[in-house]
Image (cartoon, coloured by chain):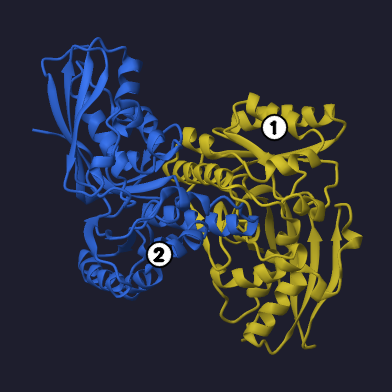
Chain colours: A blue, B yellow
Amino acid sequence: MSSGITEARAFAPASVGNIGVGFDLLGHSIDGPRDVATVRRIDAPEVRIAAIRGEVEGVAGIPLEAARNTAGQALMALRAALDLPFGLELELDKGIPLGSGLGGSAASCVAALVAANALLDTPLSREALYAFALDGEAVASGSRHGDNVAPMLLGGVVLATASRMVALEAPDWLHAVVVHPDQMLETRRARAVLAEPYPLSQVVAHSACLALFLTGLQRGDAALIGEGLKDLLVEPRRAPLIPGFAQVKRAAMDHGALGASISGAGPSVFAWFASKAAAEAAAVSMRTAFAEAGFGSRAYVSPVRGPRAEVLA
Amino acid sequence: MSSGITEARAFAPASVGNIGVGFDLLGHSIDGPRDVATVRRIDAPEVRIAAIRGEVEGVAGIPLEAARNTAGQALMALRAALDLPFGLELELDKGIPLGSGLGGSAASCVAALVAANALLDTPLSREALYAFALDGEAVASGSRHGDNVAPMLLGGVVLATASRMVALEAPDWLHAVVVHPDQMLETRRARAVLAEPYPLSQVVAHSACLALFLTGLQRGDAALIGEGLKDLLVEPRRAPLIPGFAQVKRAAMDHGALGASISGAGPSVFAWFASKAAAEAAAVSMRTAFAEAGFGSRAYVSPVRGPRAEVLA
């Protein structure tokens, strides 16, 4: 179980969790901000975090204690499952803004796992890494949902259940805009508004959207994707927590978006378009809408078939 | 708007509504019992029902008043929308047991529409008939759900939303068993138990099943279909209303069913299998299980890609 390599670096991309219609189930990676993890073998039989760096706000507040850190917990789970005879030391370079809804904690977790995997004599498959990534994600969010870690592991659009990932087809002309405003949304608050149960009629309407969306994605049918890309369950409850959301969404739809909703737990807003040009034009208007609501923002334009995490040379 | 033909007959097949994981949204037709409608042009500017016949129990109780009859209402909607200069007289030959969960009222409605359509100079597409079929179905069930009428109109497995039908791919080796026991289940009671709202965790688990099911169906992947073909929402609430259900489902699963659940509002039970041989073997055991619970039954084995309604020569 020991390879010649004693240190490896890997990146993981940001992602759009939920994709509106797939709460806790669907996500896609984006070609935008990324986290980088450096993992090295150490003699001490433990996982330790040597440093967490980055330009993004709040980095100083991320726990260095491995068991309380999403990436640390993932490496502990990997090390225990494989009964590794060596320890792992981790350094994180955060590039994904914290609390943005872009899967920052998931990316740290996946980058660390992919780097650590490169130190193994017999690296595991991405599928095998998934369970450890869920272990890590649970530290950050309190639940084992894979809609961020799965697209980071496989790239593109992924269906993530509690036990497995299914990479989904997606046409290459599909492009996403993700706009991250300078505002904070407490994840706890974002979860709390979802507690009230849902009437069957809403569940059926939601299921119809999900079925249209998946069928459209598989057929590369923009009209079907657009019919389905609606969040009838979560967005109505969370949108009031994001000042400017309605205007930003309207700006996207006015630019021909197939759909637009909240990325992950927010406050980032994403929208899908049938071409890169449409996405780029919309990104400007979406940022303007946030500015008019009083918020600076950053926008990312990416193919929906975004990259997967990879080892860096 | 008047063709040379003055009388036409058409059949519509029975169907499995909901398919477990697609409440009010997914259904498939079966090659089994069917309803036949005869429609003729009359001078009187009205829709009237001349006769309702059939070997099935309860036929005498079906309303002959067009506005209160699912097929009558569908023809009234068609006639009004097209501003037809002639009336329509309808005779129904019921072959699908009433209150069985096999889409009997939907089949009368679709058979009548397909027959009436043949009397038009420019027959409508199946897609255009859908809205009228929903109008008819609403008379029977009080809601515009298309999971029975849509597969009857298009054949095979169909995704039916309030506004459109999407025919779905399905591998030809997929076979269904549908067992109809000699017991009555009041639709009103079957609907009443669904009223209590659903927690988000259950909605997410249900959505995961739906996504796996649709992806499996599209890929012809029996394992994925099996993972997804579960009814986590409705079956737990309705199954207690169907004596013998648990044993019949177990009999199906013991014979390698990909999944088994309630057909439509019940009391019929359906199961899907990866081959016709497996379905035929299971059908015997499923009937035995109902017999042991004290109920006689009929079993139908059909390709999941069942027939669509057609005009009869």
Left or right of A123? Residue B258 is right
- On the image, the x and y values in percent for residue A229 come to 42, 60
- On the image, the x and y values in percent for residue B261 come to 67, 39
**Image vertical order of residue A307 relative to residue A216, above or below:** above
Residue type, numbered disc 1: Lys
Say which quadrant the N terminus of chain A sits in. top left
Q: For this rendering, which residue is in front, A72 or B107?
A: A72
**Image vertical order of residue A100 relative to residue A82, above or below:** below
Query: Residue A13 — which label?
Result: none
- On the image, the x and y values in percent for residue B129 come to 60, 71
Q: Are marks 1 and 2 on the same chain?
A: no
| Extreme-left residue of the structure | A313
- Residue identifier under label 2: A226
Task: Tell me the distance, in whole angstroms, between the alpha carbons under discs 1 and 2.
Answer: 38 Å
Say which quadrant the C terminus of chain A sits in. top left
**Image vertical order of residue A274 relative to residue B121, above or below:** above
Residue type, numbered disc 2: Gly
Left or right of A301? Residue A269 is right
Left or right of A70? Residue A24 is right
Left or right of A88? Residue B196 is right
Q: Chain of mark 1?
A: B
Q: Is residue B2 visible?
A: no
- Residue identifier under label 1: B249
**Image vertical order of residue B146 relative to residue A40, above or below:** below
Element at label 1:
helix
- On the image, the x and y values in percent for residue B272 come to 60, 37
